Amino acid sequence: MDIESKKFLGQPKNFVSIFNALLFDGKQMLKPEYLKDENSELVMNVSSKHVDIIKRYEDGTYLDLFVIESQSYVDPSMVARVMEYESVARMRYIRQNFKKHIPMHTRLPMILTVVLYVGETKWNAAKRLSELEIIHPGFEDMFNEFKLNLIELNTNHKYNTGEKATQDFFDLLRMIYRKQILKEDLDREFNRDALYFAYVVTKNKELLNIYQESEKGDVKVCRALDEMFEESTNKGIQMGIKQGIEQGIERGVKNTQIKIAIKMLVRNDQTLEEISEIVGLDLDALRELKKSI
């Protein structure tokens, strides 16, 4: 995935759109024309520690070093890794630009790291250093906090990138992971490069088929995905009903309750508490049903 990640996210307009999404809600505050590829020893050293893409941003008044870390799995040590990347980059910059010491009042370039999490499972690792380290009572004021700038594409949060290609990629992943297509998106056309990168990330064969059957230009994908989701949902419901009824009979639960609960669980658009209130099954029963689907 690293090659395709660099190919897609490394494009200047796509690269800055990630930061515009996180920092400015899609407003085009950062401009792609101000990006520069960075091939210095500093970047080579940091990149060797698995940072995916590093570029410089320069508008004539300041110089920033941006880093995107694209993670396809939950890494418990990520917050510590990002701290290491940034520390290495700062020390390399100091050694390269100052022989003995930093002159008074010198300001270093800002280093901003974004972790783009494209995995399907929920990010359940530390997002702050304080969640990773033991902080003993009385030491709170001395502790130096560090937090991840994290974009999670499998959540309900809808990021606005301000750039069609990355927006299409973000939205495709949300659709695949949530198995849900909105009516207003059925005839929507998606960027072809975003479609292929979404396939690389999710390994969804339907996306690959659509990509291979299409030619140049934007591509309609939602109706095919909607049919695939519907078929998958129906299979899940039927399998869940069969297994759920067997379990329900043992617990004396009515088949109707089980069928309704399983349909709601498969569609995954309500919490267990909400389903429990609607169908009248307790949470333990719903958890068992969910495992069987």
Image (cartoon, rainbow, N blue to C red):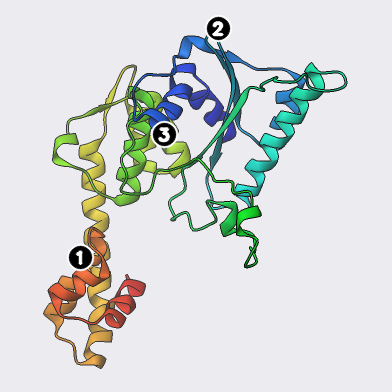
Q: Residue at x 41, y 34 (%)?
A: 22
Residue designated by label 1: 264
Vertical relation: 61 (above or below) 152: above
Residue displayed at 18% across by 42% down:
182
Residue lying at the far top in this picture: please name it: 60
The residue positioned 44% from the left and 32% from the top of the image is 197
Who is closer to the viewer here, 51 or 179? 51
Looking at the rendering, which quadrant does residue 288 occupy?
bottom left
Instruction: Name the residue that disc number 3 marks.
Output: 22
For numbered disc 2, what is the local secondary structure? Answer: loop
Q: Secondary structure at mark 3?
A: helix
**In terms of depth relative to the viewer, which is nearer, 147 or 212?**
147
Residue 55 picture location, percent across and down:
59, 21
Separation (CA) of disc 2 from disc 1:
55 Å
Where, by quadrant of the figure, is residue 252 drawn?
A: bottom left
Please give the name of the residue rendered at 57% of the width and 14% of the height, measured from the top-left corner: 62
The image quadrant of residue 246 is bottom left
Q: Position of residue 261 (x, y in %)?
A: 19, 72
Mark 1 is surrounded, within 10 Å at the Cα level, by few (under 14), some (14 to 19) or many (20 or more) other residues, namely some
> Which numbered disc flags the more N-terminal residue, 1 or 3?
3
Say few, some or many: other residues with alpha carbon within 10 Å of mark 3 (under 14 / 14 to 19 / 20 or more): some
Question: In the image, is residue 257 above or below residue 134?
Answer: below
Marks 1 & 3, CB-CB < 8 Å contact: no
User: What is the spatial separation of the Cα atoms under label 2 and label 3, in whole angstroms?
Assistant: 23 Å
Q: Nearer the viewer, mark 2 or mark 1?
A: 2
Residue 60 is labelled as 2
Q: Nearer the viewer, residue 135 or 229?
A: 135
